[in-house]
Image: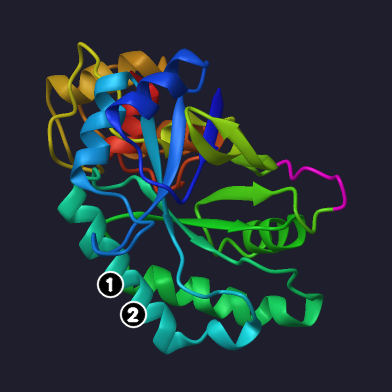
Amino acid sequence: MKGVDCARRLTPVSAKKLKAAGFDGIGRYLGPPDSWKTLTKEEVSAATSAGLRLFSIWEKAPTDAAYFTRTQASIDAREAAYWARLLGQPVGTPIFFTVDYNASPKELSVIRSYFFQLHRYLSAYTIGAYGSLSVINALHLWQAADCFFQTAAWSAGQKSAHADIYQFKNNQHAGGLIVDWNEIYNDAVLWPLPVCKNRYPGHLIRINSHGNTVRLIQKTLGIRSDGLFGPETERAVRNFQKIKKLQVDGVIGPQTWAALF
């Protein structure tokens, strides 16, 4: 899939132009609406009306190692979740927290601690990481983030095997905006969630769940459909999540549901 990310706001006209140019997703920044670069409800409406889906980015000033403290992680997690909720971003979809500089190997442990703290404070949304090849690979190795948005900057022409989104060209013109071009490999990082005939039931489905919804999941996974969510079903869900590069927890939330159906 083709995508862009940008700091400037969408209009209904620019959203339609991006879609007509073949783009499927757009990354925009979360934050208070009085900031010049943050996503608004009007933009969400413009994007979705044009057939675009969104991915959310959180960024303040993550341009050196001093930014990545436990205190800052607490602030960022709570503020990002607050603004995501106000925009109607579905629970379980990712917010990408950025490492926007050429982090050295000795700084990666500090960044890792910050991302672990994000998990402590942010439960409604999954944790995405934006950064260079070394940042993405390290955070994946440490299981410190759930999904990954790699920039070509500081990556020496190499692409991580773990990238869900790859930002490969900066400061391009599209839809009347200055944008960065992206390749999107995993549409589960996008929102709103796709509409399908099998609607998400609005609650988590996990161990000890039962009924027709569990049977539907089991049939889709190709396992015995007895309507009981037991260890066999959980294993199948975990395997499916791993293949789809989702958070591997064995629980059916909005993201896993969207990927299944």
Q: Residue at x 24, y 15 (%)?
A: 196
- Where is residue 163? Give x, y as percent: 64, 43
Q: Residue at x 31, y 50 (%)?
A: 39
* Quadrant including the C terminus: top left
Q: Secondary structure at mark 2?
A: helix
Q: Residue at x 36, y 30 (%)?
A: 53
Work out whether 94 lies above or below 221.
Answer: below
> Which mark is on residue 75?
2
Q: Residue furthest front?
A: 176
Q: Residues within 10 Å of mark 2 (few under 14, many from 20)?
A: few
Front residue (pair 246, 2): 2
Q: Is residue 99 left or right of residue 259?
A: right
Q: Main secondary structure of the magenta part?
A: loop
Q: Is residue 28 visible?
A: yes
Amino acid tagged 2: Ile
Magenta region = 156-161
Q: Secondary structure at mark 1?
A: helix
Q: Residue at x 37, y 73 (%)?
A: 76
Which residue is under mark 1? 78
- Where is residue 247? Give x, y as percent: 45, 47
- Image quadrant assignment for residue 259: top left
> Which mark is on residue 111?
none
- Where is residue 92? Give x, y as percent: 30, 47
Q: Is residue 167 magenta?
A: no
Q: Is residue 40 left or right of residue 28?
A: left
Amino acid tagged 1: Arg
Residues marked 1 and 2 touching at CB (< 8 Å): yes
Q: Residue furthest right?
A: 156
Q: Is residue 229 left or right of residue 9?
A: left
Front residue (pair 242, 77): 77
Q: Is residue 158 magenta?
A: yes
